[in-house]
Amino acid sequence: MTFTEAGARRRDAADPGHRALFHIPPADGGPHDEAAYLAGNSLGLQPRATRADLLGDLDAWARLGVEGHLEADRPWLPYHESLTGGAARLVGALPAEVVVMNSLTVNLHLLMVSFYRPGGARTQILIEDSAFPSDSYAVRSQARFHGLDPDEAVVRLRPRPGEDTLRTEDVVDHLAREGDRVALLLLGGVNYLTGELMDIPAITRAGHAAGALVGWDLAHAAGNVPLALHEWGPDFAAWCSYKYLNSGPGALAGVFVHERHLADPAVQRFEGWWSTDPATRFEMTPVARPPASADAWQVSNPPIYAMGPVRTSLEIFDRVGMPALRARSERLTGYLEQLLDEVVPARPITVVTPRDPARRGSQLSVRIGTGSAHRLAKRLRHEYGVIADAREPDIVRAAPVPLYSSYHDCWRFADALARTIEEVR
Ligand SMILES: *Cc1c(COP(=O)(O)O)cnc(C)c1O
């Protein structure tokens, strides 16, 4: 390769990121101590600060028992409010529009209770054909819940024949043609499989022009690409915090509900005691008084030990800032792309992620033309200490995460991929 390992090291010296803030897993094979971790789009790495923060919350329970609700250093009753500002800045929302709670798919269901209200000829939910399975299952079960046939109510948008990613104009054209039957548009902001970043504002506008409501699954977008949800105006969005947000497996997820819906009594919701105004919560009245904020979508009192890691992570994002992260992401991903371009021509692999940096985040998805993606990923890990992930049947995904990934990680991925593909041919 014309790109050398020494060259990758030089780039790292000039553009080091924030690797020291994170635990990097040890390599499970190969000549290096640390793994080349390119799976942060699947599970982000642990910030070094997380452990002490989490233990602090655990200590408060030991010291205070029930009094921790008010007397802990980070009191439990308003704890979730301490996550709202950071989460809102991350997605470009007003604080009142955001709440951190539950898991992603649970939140999608709670949001569809409010924003998927099929009626008359408007019954369809529009998703992308390569939607993450959980989203597919969620929308199909929502359709059944409303007494509809999911095979008819759920419409899956496919790329053009011979293409791997959706074109914005095709989504917009579909909405212009058939939008009067669409109740809800629910797409991934960054597609989990292809890494394609959708044109969220343009598609949101087209959905609204067609008279549909518009929600976004930002699982692969939050913490990966800059977002301006309030300005772009979707009705709702949801994301998880264990991918680019580094808050740990099964971490609490985020929800955005646009301001226009916050005080609207026509919006239906499933409620519990955490949906009511905290000022009157302990009056124990029989009827909830929800605040005009996304907090009203909460149901239960939240898991305190799950919130510390989200707070720790959001503090890092606040400190570094999305503009700086996006800039480093473009440099790293562009470098990985150049490496793959050198590796690809002689081998049966294709990069399916869009070439235009404006149409992708950190992830590049590689279609391997031969053999099993899972077997390939296993060999990368055990023979080269490279952690990337495989998605059936034939996609290997590599995400250089700008907070902690290095140019050397990218170089190791490309080098190991080239060698491994060479051998399975
Ligand atoms: C990761 C991911 C999920 C995972 O759902 P959980 O409810 O967090 O288990 C769902 N949808 C998309 C698009 C994802 O990328």
Image (spheres, rainbow, N blue to C red):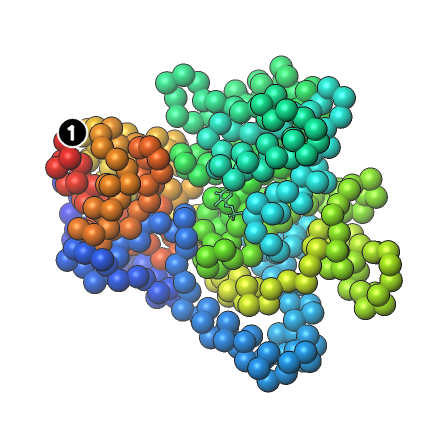
Count of numbered marks: 1
Picture layout, residue 285 above or below residue 64: above
Q: Is residue 52 left or right of residue 113?
A: left
The residue pinned by badge 1 equals 346
Report the quarter where the N terminus lies: top left
Quarter assignment of residue 79: bottom right
Q: Percent x, y for residue 29? A: 18, 56
Look at the picture and state if 360 lies above or below 224: above
Residue sitting at x 68%, y 78%: 66
Q: Secondary structure at mark 1?
A: loop
Q: Amino acid at mark 1?
A: Ala
Q: Position of residue 142 (x, y in %)?
A: 64, 35
Residue 307, quarter of picture: bottom right
Comparing 20 with 301, the one in front is 301
Who is closer to the viewer here, 25 or 364? 25
The answer to whether residue 54 is above or below residue 183 is below
Residue 139, image quadrant? top right
- Measured as percent of width and height from the top left, residue 362 is found at 39, 44
Q: Residue at x 83, y 43 (%)?
A: 265
Going 67% across and 39% down the picture, which residue do you hit? 112
Q: Is residue 316 left or right of residue 102?
A: left
Q: Quadrant of the C terminus?
A: top left
Q: Is residue 122 visible?
A: yes
Q: Residue at x 33, y 45 (%)?
A: 389
Crowd around label 1: few <14 · some 14–19 · many ≥20 (10 Å): few
- Observer able to see residue 89: no
